[in-house]
Amino acid sequence: MDKSDEETKEAIFMLHELGVADGSEGNFVPGKPITRAQAAKILVNTTKILDQLI
């Protein structure tokens, strides 16, 4: 496993822990496209977190 693979796993774990993304049925499939609904959920969740920081 190279460093970028580990960084990707850490980033996915962070997004999951923050509640930004939860994958598809609890599984992350990086090579699979996401739906518009999933993208919208990520944007809304990210906005909520950023609002808390301001």
Image: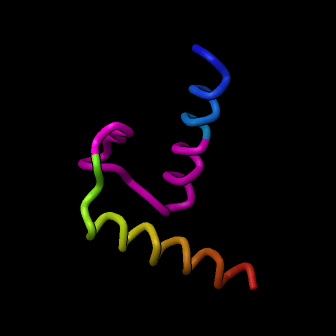
**Is residue 27 in the magenta section?**
yes
Q: How many marks?
A: 0
Give the magenta range. Answer: 11-32
Residue 51's image quarter? bottom right
Instruction: Determine the residue positioned at 62% across, 17% down.
Output: 2
Residue drawn at the location 57% of the way across and 36% of the way down: 8
- Above or below, 38 against 31 in this view is below
Is 14 drawn above or below residue 10 in the view shown? Answer: below
Q: Is residue 31 left or right of residue 46?
A: left
Residue 27 image position (x, y, % from top left): 32, 41
As for residue 31 lying within the magenta part, the answer is: yes
Query: What percent of the width, then of the height, locates residue 10?
Result: 61, 38
Nearer to me, 39 or 9: 39
Q: The N terminus lies in which quarter of the figure? A: top right
* Rendered image quadrant of residue 30: top left
Main SS of the magenta part reads: loop
Residue 5 position within the rendered picture, expressed as x and y whole percent measured from the top left: 57, 26
